[in-house]
Structure formats: C-alpha cells, structure tokens
Image (cartoon, rainbow, N blue to C red):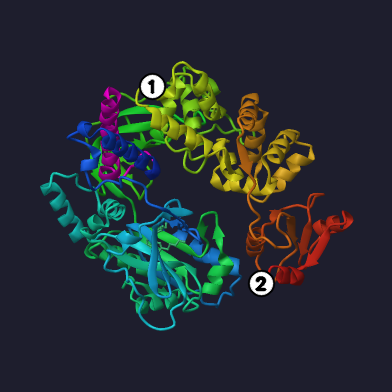
Amino acid sequence: MEEAAEELERLAGEIAEHDALYHGKDAPRISDAAYDELRKRNDAIEQRYPELVREDSPSHRVGAAPAEGFGKVVHKVPMLSLSNAFDDADVRDFCARVRRFLNLKEDETLAVTAEPKIDGLSAALRYEQGKFVLGATRGDGREGENVTENLKTIVDVPKTLKGKNIPDIVEIRGEVYMSHEDFAALNERQKAAGKPVFANPRNAAAGSLRQLDAKITASRPLRFFAYTWGEMSALPADTQAGVIDAFAKWGFAVNPLFRRCASVDELIAFYHEVEEGRAGLGYDIDGVVYKVDRLDWQNRLGFVSRSPRWAIAHKFPAEQAMTVLEKIEIQVGRTGKLTPVARLTPVTVGGVVVSNATLHNQDEIERLGVRPGDTVVVQRAGDVIPQIVRVVEDKPRGKKKFVFPETCPECGSHAVREVNPKTGKMDVDRRCTGGLVCPAQAVERLRHFVSRNAFDIEGLGEKQISAFYADGLIARPDDIFTLEARDKKSLKKLKDREGWGETSARNLFAAVDARREVDLDRFIFALGIRHVGETNARLLARSYGTLDNFEAQMRAAADREGEAWSELMSIDGVGEVLAEALTDFFDEPHNREVLAGLRKAGVEAVPLPAQETGSPIAGKTVVFTGSLERMTRSEAKARAEQMGAKVAGSVSAKTDLVVHGPGAGSKLAKAQELGIETITEDEWMEMAGA
Ligand code: IVH
C-alpha cells in the first residue's frame, strides 16, 4: 500500500512533467507509447487502491495524450516526409534535378503544383465503397494510431464521398489543423477551467486529435485539408492537380491557394505571394510544397530514403528573437563529441519557449564571437534545434571569453581535435578519447541503441538507462538482454528498486523480449557506428544480407588490398570515410564483444525482405555501364534497387549482371572476361517493365 502511494506520487510528477513538455514546449522527451504506458500504470494502481487517488492525479486531467494507447494501423503505403528547400536556388536545383532525372528536353515544360505547407499533423482517411472506415495518424510513417472516431468529428472529413465513379478503395491524406481563432478560444476555455494552455495551434491540434474520448475531440474545432493519397484502387486523374480536383468533388476541403505552375519563376513568385499573405490566412503554415504534376513522372522519379524525389517543401525563414546567453555548457555525445550548448534566458520564439540553443562546436563560438553574458539573436525553424544567429553588439557585452575545455567534462579523458590525414585539416569537433570508460558515451550509446528507430525498447528511457548504468546493471547493449536472467538470481530485484514495481519490471522484461528479433537495418543502425544513420544502415543491410556476413565482411575489409574492401567501396553510396568508420568499428575488440554478447543473449537480426519478390534481379548485384539512352543513370539505379538489386559502380567476381549502353568500355570487357551475364539497354527496359 505504501509502495502504491509512492508509485502514484512518482507517476503524477512524471506524467505532469511530460504533459508540460508535450503541450507547453512541443518537445516530448518520451515516445507516445512510453507515455501511454505511464498513464496505464497509474490507472491500474488507482483502480486497485481507489482510496489512494491523488488530488493532482493525471486521470483527472484531459488535454494530455490519451490514457490508453489507440489501436495501431499499419500504413499500406508508408507516410513519408518531404525534403526541404530553404531558398530560391534550392528550388531551381530541385527542378533541374527532376529534369535531369527524367532527361527532359530544354523546351519541354515541367509543370509543378504549388500549395501552402500546413503546420498541423498529417492523417490518413480510408474509404471503402465511398464510406469512411478507418482513420490514422502518421506515427512513425510505417505505423500510426487508429483515431477513426476522432476524425469523424471533423467537419471537413466527409463520412460518405459525393459524386460518381468513386474507386472502391480511397485513402486520402492531408493535414489536421486548428485555425488561429479557434486556438485562441480554446486556450481561453482552458484557462477559465484551470487547465494547461497549448503553446501553439499545432500542439492544440495534436493534443485534441489524440484524445481517447472522441467527445473531447468533438469539442475542439479541428479542420482538415486533403493534399495527397495512399492506397487507391484507381486514380481519378493522371496529374496531381486532376486528383486534387477530384478530391474537392468528392467533398474534401482542398487548399484554395493550390496552383499549377509551368516554370520555376512561377513557383518562386507563388512562394513570395503566399509568404506576404501568410499572416492573413487564419491558420499556420510553415512553407510551400511543390509537386511534379504528371503522375507518370512522379512514379518514375520515385523515392530516395524517406522522401519523394518529385516533391519538396520550400520553408519560410526561421523565426527569431533576442535574449541573453547566460552560460555555455558542454555536452558529451554518443560518439564522444563535445557540443557546446548555450543556456539562455527563456524567450518565446514563434510560439515556443526556448531556453537552450546549440553552438555546434568550438569554431562556431569563435565565428560568432559570442561570450557568456552577451545578448544574442536566436532562431528556430520547424523542429530544428534552436540556433544562435549573432551577437547583438550594441547591448552590454559579456566580460570573459569562453575557454573550450581540452578534457572531457564527464570522465576527464583528453578531448582532442583529430587531424584528417588526407586533407591535413583539423576536425571541427573535439572528441573525448575515453571511449567506453566515459559514462556519457556509454549512456548515450545505450540510449541510441534502444531509441525508436533502433531497437525501440518501450519503458527503457534516458532516466532508466542512466540509473541502470550508474548502478552497474547495464554497461553495454548486450546487458539489456541478460537483465532478466541476472535479476532472477539477484538479491536486489528490479521490482524493489525505487520507482519500480512488480508490473513495471514485468513490462520491461516483456518489452526487451519483444525485441530479441529486429530487422537487420535497425540492428546496424543501433550499433551507433560513426556515419551510419538510418539510410546507410539500410544500404548495408541490403548489400550484406545477414548480420554474420556483414560482420565477417567488415572484418575482412580491414585489409585494404583485399576483395572485401573493394566490394565495400564499390557499393554505390559508400565512400572512404564511411568504409573506414565501418572497418574501425569492427576492428575494436569492445565492439566485437558486444556483438558476440548480443548473439549469446539470443538477439537475432532478421534479413530485409527482397524489395520486389519475383523480380529477376532481387538480391543480385548489377552494374550499369556506357551511356543509357532510354532512362537516366539515376533512374536506372533507383529502379534496380526497387527491384531488390544492389547497384555497384565497378565489375568484380561478385557482379551478377552488367547492363551496357553505347560506349561501354573496360567494364563490359571485364564482365565478358569473367563470364558475367551482360544485357543491352533494351533488354534492361524490358526486364524493368519500363
Ligand atoms: S505532401 C510524400 N503537402 O509536411 C509526402 N505535405 O514533411 C507527401 N504537409 O508529413 C506530403 N502541408 O504532414 C504535403 N500541402 C502539403 C502539406 C504537407 C503540410 C506536411 C505533412 C508531411 C510533412 C512532410
């Protein structure tokens, strides 16, 4: 009983803290699922001990993320994001890139649509035989939450589609948002009821949509603009503009500013027009989105990483404000990088309170000439970490220059700036040389390992990891997977630790167990190898197939003269810096021990499925040589990858197929010499179904 009361007190504090971060600062620190877990735990204890329900219990509050999770919805077509353009030149580059990819003639018009980028949250609405049947949030792009009932409360979301010839399956995607007027009125009501106010309309829209009780959502006036689609059994038109027209006819709200432009100059003129009219729109937008109009071209352009090649978001300049830099602190990252962080007198920038900004590195502090005590201009753009733009020189200046430490503030090891052997230039970052002896690096590595796009272990957040690390329970990733077995034998059980109980300990063990099998790309990403982000992890997972093969090849690649090194370097997208980071990582005994430990603990990396099953080149290595005439090189590469092949830049014994166009020289000769299958561009076009 005493333990239950303590747990409720702790949960009330912790949930209130997350609510404040979520609503007030738009900076949630834990995943929605982890948050839901906390609320669930709170509710379960309250149900058992109703007499212990606190005055400040989270269950009395609405306006926070839901008390229980929503059902999950797997998006049949992933919900991707957009890459960004920040100035006119980026927009010109975008159009030029598209033209090059499609090999358009100079006089051929590239029609591109333009529309405002709505600052809300995206949602997918599924209609079957014209009836609204399922609505979901974006989530992580692969899987969102089922918020059907909540979406039904939105006036702009038709329950039944209007008109004729509606495809059997229609999945409309667009943005849920709240108008300025409705946002102000909602906050007035929140204030009057003594409830927390929302920092901006986007947070208010997100908080309102993600209510378990759809009646609460219904009382929050949300709106919806339709701007794209997911799964469709048929498309109503063959252009972006045509499809959007059909959406309007079916009863959706589409943005009235939507325009089809015939040149880059028109796009840029549209951007400036929208920017000028922005304040009078009545809802928040954070830029303009451009999309190639012809859908057959969109298909050919396809995707790179998580964004389409056929669209781009042209962002408005960042919002700025003035404040005082109180002090500079050093944070040590997962890779040992020392990052100076500016602690600021809190200031509101574009509706969000900012109290920290990154200073990136030593050179940046010098470039800005900034000293603690200076008044500075800070800016934030979208979800980017706030930055310091400049020192305000006519305000009183700070007295003392900041001296960048040459030792790690966490472990006292030397912190050095490496010199790149090739360029002879000093690295901009200073790094701690302490490796695993440095607690910051170890904790950061562990945090990265369990993070959402890596092993994604629920209930193992920063706080828990730091505490487990401090108590010697988890020092390396593989320790996570032996925690339960060790706990069974230990006298001091996890359930008896402060802040833990029977259920939470059981939940954690279950969450760990659920991740004994993860996709190979997540596994590789989780290792925290320098320069290996999600994209490179996927590339490596596709190229090497299995974890055993990947590890063996990376170890073999330590020999720069050997085949494994040349194979690694021949992967399109792998350069020397990445290749070296990989071989260095596997050369390090500590890292190999972690991998062995993970295997021993029964952790398995699941190979990625071939991208297109049944494709004749799935899992094969293809090389393109000579000049292709019917498809650009980038398009051919993208298509081959889509068909599950690896594309290499040079021919070796590992090559399965060489596609040759006119002018093919030594690569074709080498392929013939090695007896590798070679085909012409026409044969390739047939194989690619293009
Ligand atoms: S099109 C394949 N159009 O921006 C991506 N997105 O960074 C298709 N957004 O998650 C998205 N207004 O939430 C598109 N007019 C618009 C948009 C828009 C806002 C958001 C959307 C998306 C994010 C992409």
Q: Nearer the viewer, residue 542 or 684?
A: 542
- Quadrant where the C terminus is found in the figure: bottom right
Residue marked by disc 2: 690
Which amino acid type corresponds to the residue marked 1 in the rendered image? Answer: Arg
Q: State the residue at coordinates (73%, 68%).
A: 684
Q: In terms of image quadrants, where is residue 498? A: top left
Q: Mark 2 CB in 8 Å range of ligand 1?
A: no
Q: Is residue 309 above or below residue 69?
A: below
Q: Tell me if mark 1 has few (under 14), some (14-19) or many (20+) residues whose alpha carbon lies within 10 angstroms of its own.
A: few
Q: Nearer the viewer, residue 608 or 256?
A: 608
Left or right, 191 with reference to 379: left
The residue drawn where x is 39% and y is 28% is 502
**Position of residue 62 in the picture relative to residue 143 (left or right):** left
| Disc 1: which residue | 497
Task: Name the dominant secondary structure of the magenta segment.
Answer: helix
Can you tell which mark lies on residue 410?
Answer: none
Q: Is residue 15 magenta?
A: yes
Q: Position of residue 448 (x, y in %)?
A: 49, 35
Image coordinates for residue 141, horizontal then vertical, percent: 46, 54
Residue, x 73% and y 38% (percent of image)? 553
Q: Is residue 434 visible?
A: no
The magenta segment is 1-30
User: Picture quarter containing residue 61?
Assistant: top left
